Image (cartoon, rainbow, N blue to C red):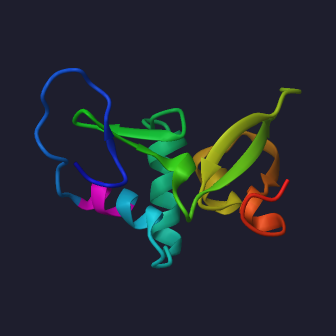
């Protein structure tokens, strides 16, 4: 079982497929910087027209929880004609705006370890 993905089905599944999508999702968990194209592809996979519609990418019985990825940020999003902010996870605002064209406002939410150190409140 890979370190970044977990099995989300009860039945037996083959090992995670080795393709461009799974390598991209695993790269988001690492320290190697993502290119603009890779950031856009991650946001499209999560929130685009045929995306997962949430912060977890699922493929072949395996799931990558992108909220835990090092290079993915928590962003609050308000759509046009909506008064409620919704939580999204994406590499940055630009990639999320490209995947969600009806966005009116976005706000970054900092992680605890970004404030004053690990575990700070």
Question: Could you tell whether 55 is left or right of 7 in the image?
Answer: right
Residue range highlighted in magenta: 20-24
Question: Could you tell whether 109 is left or right of 30 in the image?
Answer: right
Residue 21, magenta (yes or no): yes
Residue 84 x %, y % = 84, 27
Residue 57, magenta (yes or no): no
Q: Nearer the viewer, residue 8 or 92?
A: 8
Residue 46 x %, y % = 49, 43
Question: Could you tell whether 39 is left or right of 64 in the image?
Answer: right
- Whether 54 is drawn above or below 98: the answer is above
Residue at 49% of width from left, 73% of height from top?
34
Asked whether residue 16 appears in the rendered view, the answer is yes
Asked whether residue 48 appears in the rendered view, the answer is no
Count of numbered circles on the image: 0
Residue at 47% of width from left, 55% of height from top?
42
Q: Nearer the viewer, residue 78 or 118?
A: 118
Residue at 57% of width from left, 47% of height from top?
67
């Amino acid at each position: 079982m890979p370190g970044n993905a977990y099995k989300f089905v009860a039945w037996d599944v083959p090992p995670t497929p080795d393709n461009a999508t799974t390598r991209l999702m695993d790269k988001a968990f690492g320290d190697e910087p993502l290119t603009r194209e890779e950031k856009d592809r991650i946001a499209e996979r999560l929130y685009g027209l045929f995306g997962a519609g949430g912060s977890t990418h699922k493929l072949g019985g395996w799931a990558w929880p992108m909220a835990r990825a090092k290079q993915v940020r928590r962003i609050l999003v308000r759509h046009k004609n909506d008064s409620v902010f919704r939580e999204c996870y994406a590499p940055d605002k630009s990639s999320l705006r490209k995947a969600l064209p009806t966005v009116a406002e976005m706000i970054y939410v900092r992680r605890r370890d970004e404030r004053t150190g690990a575990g700070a409140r």
